[in-house]
Image: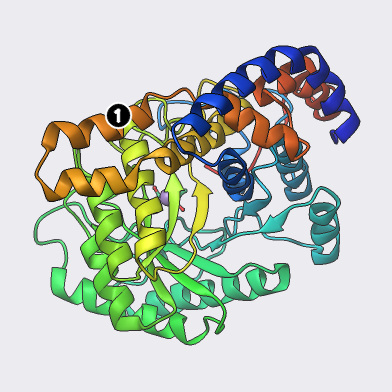
Amino acid sequence: MKLTLDQIQNQNNSQSAEHSRSFEFLAESLEKKGNNVEELISKLQALQIAIPSWALGTGGTRFGRFSGGGEPATLIQKIQDVGILHALNQSSNAVSLHIPWDIPSDYQAIKDSASEVGIGFDAVNSNTFQDQANQSHSYKFGSLANSDAAVRELAVEHNKQVIEIGEKLGSKALTVWLADGSSFPGQHSLRKALENTHLSLQEIYKDIPEDWKLLIEYKPYEPNFYSTVIQDWGTSFLLANKLGKKAFTLVDLGHHLPNTNIEQIVATLMTEGKLGGFHFNDSKYGDDDLTVGSVKPYQLFLIFQELVKGFSETNNPPLSWMIDASHNLKDPMEDLIQSVQAIKLSYAQALLVDSKSLEAAQEIHDVAGAQEILQDAFRTDLRPLLAEAMRRSGGAIDPIKGFRSLKVRETLIQERGLKSIASGL
Ligand code: PSV
Ligand code: MN
C-alpha cells in the first residue's frame, strides 16, 4: 500500500476550514508575542524523526504477545509502512535498521523501495544481546565485555558487518547497545568488563567511516540486574571520549533510574559536544518503551528546551533523532504517529520559550518568574501550528485521523493477512 498526495489532500479538505480558523487565531497571538510564525513552521518542517524497523509490528512482553493484523513481514513491507507514516506526517523520512533482525538481501530492491517513498536510512543498530542460529560462540555472558577473547572477536566482527551493511544503504551512524553486565555480585570483574568493552569498541571504531558516528547507548539495568557495563551517560561519555571524535553518547529516554534529570544530562553532553542522538519513548517505571509524551510530556518539553538552547549556545553536532518504542496495545503505526507528534510539539513549545526573559530571570534569581516563562510556553496549545507545518509539507492536518479515514490498517490486513508477523522484539 502507498498513500498519494491526492488522497491526503482530499481527506484534508473536510478539516481545512476548521484548521485554518484555529491556525490563524494562534498565529496572530504568537506574532503579537513577538514570535516569527513562518520561522517556527520551517523549523518544525525540518525536524525528521527516524522510525525503528523493529517497531512496526507488535512488541509484546515476556508474558505474551498479542499480534495485530497486517504486520510487515519483510523489510520492504516495513519500508512501505514508514513511507505511509511519512506521507501522513512528512516528519519521518528515515528508517533505523536493527541487524540481524532486518538484514537486506537485495540491496538494490531495498534502496529502490525506500527512495520510491522518500525514505533514507538512519543509524544501523548492532545486536549482540541475542544468539543467532548456528552462532559459533554464545553471548549469554556478554559480548564486547566477555572474558573470552573469541566471543569478543565475534561481537566485534558482527559490528563491523553492520557498518558494511549501513554503508551500502547510506547510513551515517552505528548505534551500539550492549546488554553486557552481571546479574549477581561477584559474577564478573567490573573493571575487566569495562576494559574489555573499551578495547572491543576501539576495534569497531577503527572501521567507523570518517563521516560516520559511533553512538554509544547506555542503560542502567535489564537484561542484567546487578550491573550493566555501560550503565549510565557518564560511562558512555567516558568511552566516547577515549575513542575519539567520531564517538558520541546516545540517550534513550527509558534508560534512566526513576526521576533522573535527563534534561541536565542533555545539557552536560551538549556542552561537551558529545550528544549524538536520541531514542525517544516514554515510561512510568523502567524501560517501558511507551508512546513518546504519553506519561511525562513536561519532561519531554524540558529536554527540548535544553536541546534548543544547546543548538544555539554550543558546538554540538547535529543529532540522530530516532524512536525506540514497543507497542503492545495500540496499532504500532498509530503509536508511532502519536510519538512523532509529541516530539514535534515539544520542540515547538521549546522554540516558543522566551530565552532572553528566562536568562534575565535567572540572573536576578527570579525563580517564580523563570517558571512562569517556561510554563507559558509549555501550556500554549501549538497543535494548529504543527498541523499547518505538516499540511504545507504535503502531509495530513491530523495524521491519526488520516490514517483511520484512509483505512490504512484495513488495507494492510487485506494485503498481508491477519496473521503476518514482523521480525523484531
Ligand atoms: C535496549 O533496551 C534498546 O533500547 C536498544 O536500543 C536496543 O537496540 C533496542 O532497545 C531494541 O531492543
Ligand atoms: Mn534504545
Q: Residue tagged by mark 1?
A: 375
Residue at image x 52%, y 33%?
A: 31
Q: State whether residue 299 is above or below residue 203.
A: above
Q: Is residue 56 visible?
A: yes
Relative depth, front residue between 155 and 286: 286
Q: Tell me where residue 348 appears, x and y as whole percent.
A: 48, 38
Res. 153 image quadrant:
bottom left
Residue 309 in the figure: left or right of residue 55: left
Q: How many marks?
A: 1
Which class describes the residues within 10 Å of circle 1: few (<14), some (14-19), or many (20+)? some
Residue 141 in the figure: left or right of residue 124: left
Q: State whether residue 18 is above or below residue 342.
A: above
Hey, which residue is sitting farthest right in the picture? 6
| Three-letter code for the amino acid on which mark 1 is drawn | Gln
Residue at image x 54%, y 42%?
A: 36
Residue at image x 54%, y 77%?
A: 160
Q: Is residue 178 visible?
A: no
Coloring basis for residues: rainbow
Relative depth, front residue between 123 and 126: 123
Residue 328 in the figure: left or right of residue 271: right
Q: Tell me where residue 13 appears, x and y as whole percent.
A: 82, 17
Looking at the rendered structure, the secondary structure element under dot 1 is helix
Relative depth, front residue between 188 and 75: 75
Disc 1 residue: CB within 8 Å of ligand 2 = no
Res. 395 image quadrant:
top right
Q: Tell me where residue 133 appears, x and y as whole percent.
A: 57, 58
Q: Tell me where residue 131 appears, x and y as whole percent.
A: 48, 58
Relative depth, front residue between 120 and 399: 399
| Quadrant housing the N terminus | top right
